[in-house]
Amino acid sequence: MVTWAVRAYGWRVAGVTAALLLVTAPWDSRTDAVGVFAAAPVLIWYAVFARTAGRGMLVGAVLTGLMGWMVVPRALGWTGRWLVPSLGDTLTWYPWLTAGICLLGARVGRSRPNNRERRDWGWPGAIGLAALSLVALCATCPGWWLVDLDRPPPGDEGLFPMPAGLAVRHGEGCGSGGCWRTAVVTGARADARLRTHLAGRGYRLRPDTGWAGEFDAVARHRTGVLIPHHVWLGYAATPDGAVRLVWTVEPAIDL
């Protein structure tokens, strides 16, 4: 009995566990909620639609890889237009793509005539998953729009944690043009160490030619495949050796 249970469900448990560990790792403070949403197609696939270990784990691996791509690079603070999906990508076209993968996996499984179990559930189950993904899309996409248009203070945006030995004093504010966050960084060689830290996080500083000369340098950090996510960072070194940072998020769609 135990052997049968392990053979029948062990690979499902392994697939689900791997997915949950990947998206709930302590990448940053805001990864878990997005990760659970991104993991939903993987969990549904293993729980409802996968029937045999071979094909079930193959499709599950594709879904898990796509899920990891949605969550991990952004959580690690990576940058790049085509390499790092944005939160907007996760909440818009990702549900459609995963529904298509599951639909294809279900259809291929059903097309094999020697598998009676697969013939029995076939299209109804796949259509159910597509409908569930559509519901998720309809529920989350407006939410993303509301969050985007409301323009709350930005998150850490890959800036933290700071190098060891540097102290940080945080702040934030909002105005007619949106919201922003600030950080005053102090410590030995704060300017040089912070410039190296920012370069490693994808923030390429250049001289400030706008923003009324308020900063010594500015940087633009861009992620997103179809839905862009732009972070503008202002950088100013003070005479007492501290560094002042100000960053804000540019709306993906400016109405």
Image (cartoon, grey):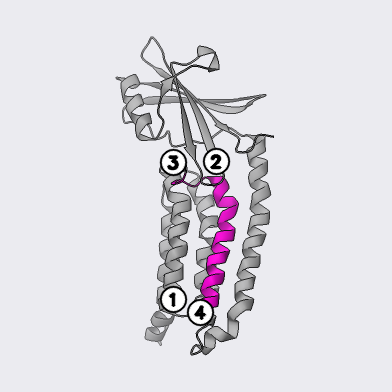
Would residue 187 be visible to someone looking at this image? Answer: no
- Name the element at disc 1: helix
Q: Earlier in the sequence, mark 1 or mark 2?
A: 1
Label 3: how many Cα within 10 Å (few below 14, some 14–19, many 20+): some
Rendered image quadrant of residue 228: top right
Residue 101 drawn in magenta:
yes
Q: Earlier in the sequence, mark 1 or mark 3?
A: 1
> Which residue is rendered at x = 35% and y = 25% of the image?
195
Q: Nearer the viewer, mark 1 or mark 3?
A: 3
Q: Earlier in the sequence, mark 3 or mark 2?
A: 3
Q: Are marks 4 and 1 in contact (CB under 8 Å)?
A: yes
Q: Which mark is residue 228?
A: 2
Span shown in magenta:
82-109
Q: Left or right: 136 with respect to 162?
A: right
Q: Is residue 199 above or below residue 39?
A: above
- Name the element at disc 2: loop
Label 4: how many Cα within 10 Å (few below 14, some 14–19, many 20+): many
Q: Which mark is residue 80?
A: 3
Of the residues shown, which amino acid type is indicated by label 2?
Answer: Pro
The CA span between labels 1 and 3 is 33 Å
From the top left corner, tell me how far across and down residue 252 is, in percent: 60, 38
The CA span between labels 3 and 2 is 10 Å
- Name the element at disc 4: helix
Of the residues shown, which amino acid type is indicated by label 3?
Answer: Gly
Q: Are marks 4 and 2 in contact (CB under 8 Å)?
A: no
From the top left corner, tell me how far across and down residue 110 is, in percent: 54, 81
Q: Earlier in the sequence, mark 4 or mark 1?
A: 1
Reading the image, the residue beneath label 4 is 109
Of the residues shown, which amino acid type is indicated by label 4?
Answer: Gly
> Quick one: 104 or 157, which is closer to the camera?
104
Q: Which mark is residue 55?
A: 1
- Name the element at disc 3: loop
